[in-house]
Amino acid sequence: MTQIAPARFDDIAAIVGLMQRAYRGEESKKGWTSEADLIDGDRTTPEDIGKVLANPNHHFLVARDAAGQIIGCADIEWLDDPARSCSFGKFAVEPSLQGSGLGKQLMQAAEAAAVAVFGAHRMTMTVIEGRAELVAFYQRRGYRATGSAVSMADIHHDPSMTRGHNLILLEYDKSLQTKWA
């Protein structure tokens, strides 16, 4: 039985490890979210996750298996904008469990938490341009392109991190008043 609950500070090392396995290195290629051929470096650090957990504008969720091991995670950040938006990110599922429905379950929990914790009406996220399988996953869950985009070079100033690729992050959003299909 999977349990989804807020992350604790003693979860930091497990969260960082999960995010690394899901997005970087050879193990990430077992799943379908790998960025290993696009981006170098760590996906996150213990310091970054610690700052997120300490920030009251964030609500970080973890999914645990029956043994209590962290097998998924997602962060929602309150943007405090007129549209009452939260941003969805730091989304990871253990590579061997991708495609099992855990990601959908975790995303539903994050959307419900955005409404319950922050009173959000809208969720936003960014996806690397060209990641058709990820875009399709999010579109099946009601997310639509906003037309906004940002270059990863504007976020990560070290071109070696993106292996010289000019990666573009496309924004997607969803009304949290919409029911799941």
Image (tube, helix red, strand yellow):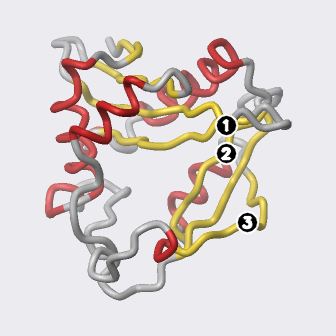
Q: In which quarter of the image is residue 43?
A: bottom left
Foreground: 61 or 143?
Answer: 61
Q: Residues within 10 Å of mark 3 (few under 14, many from 20)?
A: few
Q: Residues within 10 Å of mark 1 (few under 14, many from 20)?
A: some
Which residue is painted at 24% across and 25% down in the image? 70
User: Going by the image, does 32 lie left or right of 27?
Assistant: right
Query: Residue 172 location, x and y as percent?
Result: 69, 54
Compared to residue 138, the image places residue 18 above or below, namely above
User: Going by the image, does 107 lie left or right of 74?
Assistant: right
Compared to residue 18, the image places residue 28 above or below, namely below
Pointer 2 or 1: first along the chain: 1
List the residue tagged with mark 1.
79
Question: Label 3 is placed on what type of residue?
Answer: Ser
Q: How far apart are marks 3 and 2 (CA)?
A: 11 Å
List the residue tagged with mark 2.
124
Q: Are marks 2 and 1 in contact (CB under 8 Å)?
A: yes
Foreground: 5 or 108?
Answer: 5
So how many labels did they put on this image?
3
Looking at the rendered structure, the secondary structure element under dot 3 is: strand
Query: Residue 17 location, x and y as percent?
Result: 17, 41
Give residue 148's mark.
3
Point out the image quarter for the N terminus.
top left
Which residue is painted at 28% across and 49% down in the image? 44
Looking at the rendered structure, the secondary structure element under dot 2 is: strand
Query: Residue 171 location, x and y as percent?
Result: 66, 59
Which residue is painted at 56% across and 26% down in the image? 57
Q: Distance between the residues labelled 2 and 1?
A: 10 Å
Q: How far apart are marks 1 and 3 (CA)?
A: 16 Å
Compared to residue 180, the image places residue 1 above or below, namely above
Q: Residue furthest bottom?
A: 164
Question: Label 1 is placed on what type of residue?
Answer: Leu
